Amino acid sequence: MRWSVSLQAEGDREIELEEVVELADAVAIHEGVATGMGTQSYGAQVVVEADSSDEALERAMAIFARAAVRVGLPDWPVVNVETTADEVETEWYQEIPEGRGFSGGGVG
């Protein structure tokens, strides 16, 4: 099963744009995105294959740690994690009534 895992590490200095861009590059192979510019934290969301939420978290933590080391980010503690099974997201989208999806258009 595919899992989307979000992780956030927090520390004592502001994260710069270049660091977030490098982190995003490092996790891109895992369908990842990164956050944190201008804050005292950095984070990433990655997609992993796993049989359970615990296994997904373990795999994502390893990816996150390797990516942070690779780009030279501080070794800060992970303070927030969230796992979501892709099936849950799929079910949510299936509940949207037909013709009610986002059109991308403006108001009016």
Image (cartoon, helix red, strand yellow):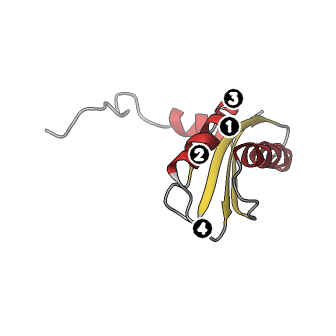
Residue 82 relative to residue 60: left or right: left
Q: Amino acid at mark 2?
A: Ala
Q: Name the element at disc 3.
A: helix
* Residue at figure coordinates x 66%, y 68% from the top left: 11
Q: Amino acid at mark 4?
A: Arg
Query: Residue 47, position in %: x, y?
Result: 70, 36
Disc 4 from disc 1: Cα separation: 22 Å
Disc 2 from disc 3: Cα separation: 12 Å
Q: Disc 4 vs disc 1: Cβ atoms closer than 8 Å?
A: no
Q: Amino acid at mark 3?
A: Ile
Which corner quadrant holds the N terminus?
Answer: top right
Which numbered tag is attached to residue 34? 2
| Residue of label 4 | 13
Q: Disc 1 vs disc 2: Cβ atoms closer than 8 Å?
A: yes
Q: Disc 1 vs disc 3: Cβ atoms closer than 8 Å?
A: yes
Disc 1 from disc 2: Cα separation: 8 Å
Which numbered tag is attached to residue 27? 1
Q: Residues within 10 Å of mark 1 (few under 14, many from 20)?
A: many
Give the label, 2 or 4, closer to the camera.
Answer: 4
Q: Residues within 10 Å of mark 3 (few under 14, many from 20)?
A: few
| Residue of label 3 | 29
Q: Amino acid at mark 1?
A: Val
In-front residue for pair 105/13: 13
Query: Residue 57, position in %: x, y?
Result: 80, 49
Disc 1 from disc 3: Cα separation: 5 Å
Query: Residue 14, position in %: x, y?
Result: 55, 64
Q: Earlier in the sequence, mark 3 or mark 4?
A: 4
The answer to whether 98 is drawn above or below residue 55 in the figure is: above
